[in-house]
Amino acid sequence: MLGYWNYTVLLTYLSVLLACLGIGLCLVDVNHATDFAALCLLTCGLFDMFDGKVARTKKDRTEMEKDFGIQIDSLSDLVAFGILPAVIGYRLLDGLWNKWYSIFFIIILLMYVLFGLVRLGYFNALENKRTQTENTVLKYYTGLPITMASLMIPCVYCLNFVFDIEYFRFIYLAALGIIGILFVLKIKLPKAGKKLIPIFTIIGLVLCITIIVLYFLSK
């Protein structure tokens, strides 16, 4: 059987499956699909935060296992933080397909996915080059890490319970366009240290609870 099926890749596998669940809910037109998909996105972010730490607990990993983990992590990130947010945006466009300006929204969704893909590919290539020529710890990211979408997009999504859907869809798509540009913008951002992981975790849990509470209040 191809691949590796031990606990070191469990969170990555769960992340991509959860992302696919969120995508499927949006595409099959389930009620409140985007609410559930936003929760899937948040959970994927939490899984991504700890998958590397879990993998490193296995001290006897081979180089092949390490390389495999790196590759599937990037592929999972593309599905969870690249495709899933775009599919949420696609679902929010229901009722606008007969409008002439809907083409601009489709372009935003496509460019978001493309920029996310480019960000991941560039980062992987840069990391490979850096590890071969330097023996230092990465201190800065070039461009916004795609994983940050797991926090930024749910923050924006909470506005869904404040604004009417007619206005919110424009807010969401505008935010998606800005985040996509930040993926490929040549700016240096400091790498989040270990001390920030608990903070990001708390923010993620608060957002999860907020979306769930707002969901029940809006019913």
Image (cartoon, grey):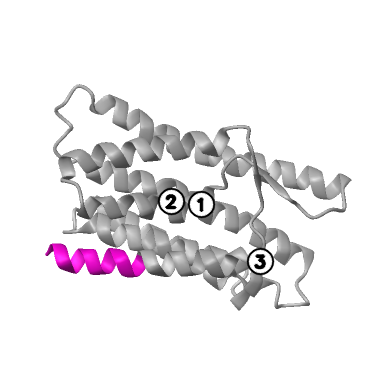
Q: Residue at x 40, y 58 (%)?
A: 41
Who's the residue at 16% across and 39% down the image? 166
Can residue 170 be seen at all in this image of the molecule? yes
**Which residue type carries mark 2?**
Met
Q: Name the residue under label 1.
A: 148
48 relative position to 215: left or right: right
The answer to whether residue 106 is above or below residue 153 is: above
Tag in front: 1 or 3: 3
Q: Say which element carries label 1.
A: helix
> Which of the 4 image quadrants contains residue 38?
bottom left
State the image coordinates of residue 145 (x, y, percent, origin top left). 57, 47
Sooner in the amino-acid sequence: mark 1 or mark 3: 1
Reply yes or no: does residue 214 show up in magenta.
yes
Q: Which residue is drawn at 64% across and 67% down?
A: 195
Q: At label 3, which amino acid type do we have?
A: Lys
Mark yes or no: residue 13 visible: no
Tag 1 and tag 2, C-beta contact below 8 Å: yes
Quadrant (top left, top right, bottom left, bottom right) of the N terminus: bottom right
Question: Of callouts 3 and 2, which one flags the residue occurring earlier in the amino acid sequence?
Answer: 2
Q: Give the range drawn in magenta.
A: 208-219
What secondary structure characterizes most of the magenta part? helix
In front here: 75 or 77? Answer: 77
Query: How far apart in space, not on screen, are marks 3 and 2 (Cα)?
Result: 20 Å
Report the residue at 65% width, 71% height from top.
53
Rendered image: mark on residue 179? none
Residue designated by label 2:
152
Badge 2 crowding class, 10 Å Cα cut-off, few under 14, some 14 to 19, many 20 or more, is some
Type of amino acid at the residue the image marks with label 1: Met
* Residue 98, quarter of the rendered image: top left
Tag 3 residue: 194
Helix or strand or loop: what does disc 3 sit on? loop
